[in-house]
Image (cartoon, helix red, strand yellow):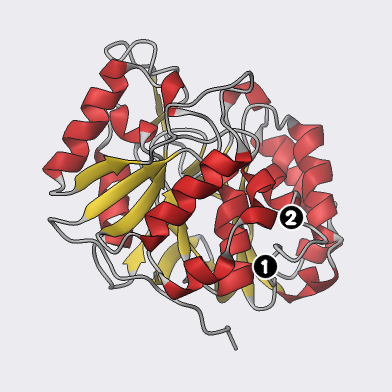
C-alpha cells in the first residue's frame, strides 16, 4: 500500500506566495519577464513576496548556501505564506540538503513548486518529511506572454483544487528561447502520446528531472520507490546515450523492482532523441518489460507543462490503444 504523506493546504485567492532562489538567482530574469509573471500571479488573486536573498548572484549565477537556506526557512516559518515557488532551475539545490532544518518543513507544511533542479528539493522533502511538493512551472515560467493557457490550467487543477484530474496532451508545444523574443514563437504540432509498453499501474508519483533525481541515489534524501509511478524527464544535455545510462543507473536501485510504471516527459529538440532511439533504450531493459511505459508527456523542459505532485498518487492505463493518465491525489 502507498505510504501516508502530508498534503499542504490548497491555494485560494488572497494567499501569499513567496519566491525563493534555491538554485539560480532572480538576477538573471529580465524585467520584462518579471512584469508578465507578476501580472499572472495577480490575476490568480495571489500576492507575491520575495525572499531577501533572491537577487544575490555569484560566479555560478546563484548565491551562498546560507542565503538560500535562510530564504527557504523564512518562507516555511512565515505563517502568512501559503506556497513557495522557485525562481528557476539551475544546478546546485542539492548543496542545501544537509543544511535544511527538516523539522521546520514538516511542522509548517505548505506548497513548494518548481522544476528541473528543484527535483532535488521535491524528492528530499518527501523522503525526509513526507510532505508532498510539486514539479511544475517556476516563477520565471509565468513570464511567458503567449501560449501559457495549458500550463496555467494544470497549475490551477493541481494547486487550487482537490479533485482528481486526467492529463490530456497539449495540441501544440514549443522548445524555443521565448524569453529572448516573446512575440516570435516557434510552435510544433503534437504527435500525441507515445506508447512503449501497455499495462495498468497506480502508485506514488516520484521523480521528474532524471539527472537531478539520480544525484540523490544512495543518500538519505532519495525517496522510496515502493509502489511508485516514476515520472522522468531531462533537458537538452540528455542526449540518447546519456538518458540511457542515467535511466540504467536508476534501474539498478535495489527497490526499482517495486516501480509500477514509467511516464517520460517530452525531450528537447537539442537532445536528438527520436521515438526509434527511445524504443531501443526502453526495450533493452528487461526490468521495464512488465510495466506500462508512456512517453511524450507535457512535463520537463519544453512548454507547456503540467504540474505534478511529488508524493501524490497517479494512475496510468494503456490498453489496446486507449490511454488514460490521471492524477488521483494531489
Can residue 227 be seen in the rendering of this structure?
A: yes
- Quarter of the rendering occupied by the N terminus: bottom right
Out of 18 and 297, give the one closest to the viewer: 18
Q: Residue at 71% x, 43% y: name it.
A: 211
75, above or below 255, in the image: above
Q: Residue at 30% x, 22% y: name it.
A: 33
Residue topped by disc 1: 223
Q: Residue at 12% x, 49% y: name it.
A: 45
Q: Where is residue 322 in the image (x, y as percent from the top left)?
A: 46, 63
Q: Where is residue 91 in the image (x, y as percent from the top left)?
A: 64, 34
Q: Is residue 261 left or right of 281 when viewed as pictured?
A: left
78, above or below 94, in the image: below
Indicate the secondary structure of the residue bearing disc 1: loop
Indicate the secondary structure of the residue bearing disc 2: loop
Out of 113 and 183, give the one closest to the viewer: 113
Q: Is residue 68 left or right of 164 when viewed as pictured?
A: right
Can residue 172 be seen in the rendering of this structure?
A: no
For the residues marked 2 and 1, what is the alpha-carbon distance in whole angstroms?
9 Å
Q: Are marks 2 and 1 in contact (CB under 8 Å)?
A: yes
Q: Residue at 69% x, 27% y: name it.
A: 237
Q: How crowded is mark 2: few (under 14 residues within 10 Å), some or many (20 or more)?
A: some
Q: Is residue 74 left or right of 38 when viewed as pictured?
A: right
Q: Where is residue 294 in the image (x, y as percent from the top left)?
A: 58, 55
Query: What count of labels does the image hold?
Result: 2
Residue topped by disc 2: 216
Q: Where is residue 57 in the image (x, y as percent from the top left)?
A: 52, 23
Which quadrant would residue 87 be assigned to in this image?
A: top left
Q: In the displayed image of the protein, which residue is found farthest to the bottom?
A: 1
Q: How crowded is mark 1: few (under 14 residues within 10 Å), some or many (20 or more)?
A: many
Looking at the image, tell me whether mark 2 or mark 1 is earlier in sequence order.
2
Amino acid at each position: 500500500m502507498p505510504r501516508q504523506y502530508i498534503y499542504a493546504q490548497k491555494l485560494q485567492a488572497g494567499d501569499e506566495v513567496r519566491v525563493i532562489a534555491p538554485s539560480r538567482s532572480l538576477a538573471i530574469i529580465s524585467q520584462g519577464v518579471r512584469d508578465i509573471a507578476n501580472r499572472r500571479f495577480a490575476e490568480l488573486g495571489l500576492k507575491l513576496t520575495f525572499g531577501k536573498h533572491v537577487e544575490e548572484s555569484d560566479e555560478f549565477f546563484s548565491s551562498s548556501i546560507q542565503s538560500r537556506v535562510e530564504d527557504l526557512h523564512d518562507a516555511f516559518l512565515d505563517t502568512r505564506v501559503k506556497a513557495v515557488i522557485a525562481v528557476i532551475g539551475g544546478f546546485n539545490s542539492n548543496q542545501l540538503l544537509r543544511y535544511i532544518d527538516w523539522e521546520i518543513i514538516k511542522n509548517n507544511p505548505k506548497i513548494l513548486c518548481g522544476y528541473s533542479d528543484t527535483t532535488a528539493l521535491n524528492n528530499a522533502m518527501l523522503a525526509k518529511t513526507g510532505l508532498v511538493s510539486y514539479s511544475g512551472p517556476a516563477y520565471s515560467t509565468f513570464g511567458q506572454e503567449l501560449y501559457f493557457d495549458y500550463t496555467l490550467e494544470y497549475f490551477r487543477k493541481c494547486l487550487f483544487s482537490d479533485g482528481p484530474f486526467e492529463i490530456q496532451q497539449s495540441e501544440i508545444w514549443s522548445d524555443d528561447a521565448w524569453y529572448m523574443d516573446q512575440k516570435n514563437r516557434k510552435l510544433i504540432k503534437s504527435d500525441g502520446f507515445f506508447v512503449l509498453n501497455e499495462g495498468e499501474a497506480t502508485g506514488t508519483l516520484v521523480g521528474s528531472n532524471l539527472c537531478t533525481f539520480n544525484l540523490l541515489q544512495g543518500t538519505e534524501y532519495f525517496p522510496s520507490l515502493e509502489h511508485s509511478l516514476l515520472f522522468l524527464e531531462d533537458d537538452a544535455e540528455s542526449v540518447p546515450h546519456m538518458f540511457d545510462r542515467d535511466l540504467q543507473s536508476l534501474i539498478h536501485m535495489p527497490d526499482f523492482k517495486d516501480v509500477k510504471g514509467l511516464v517520460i516527459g517530452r525531450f528537447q529538440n537539442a537532445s536528438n532523441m527520436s521515438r526509434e532511439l527511445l524504443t531501443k533504450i526502453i526495450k533493452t531493459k528487461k526490468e521495464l518489460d512488465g510495466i506500462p511505459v508512456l512517453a511524450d508527456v507535457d512535463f520537463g523542459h519544453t512548454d507547456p507543462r503540467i504540474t505534478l505532485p511529488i508524493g501524490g498518487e497517479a494512475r496510468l492505463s494503456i490498453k489496446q490503444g486507449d490511454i488514460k493518465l490521471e492524477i488521483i491525489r494531489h
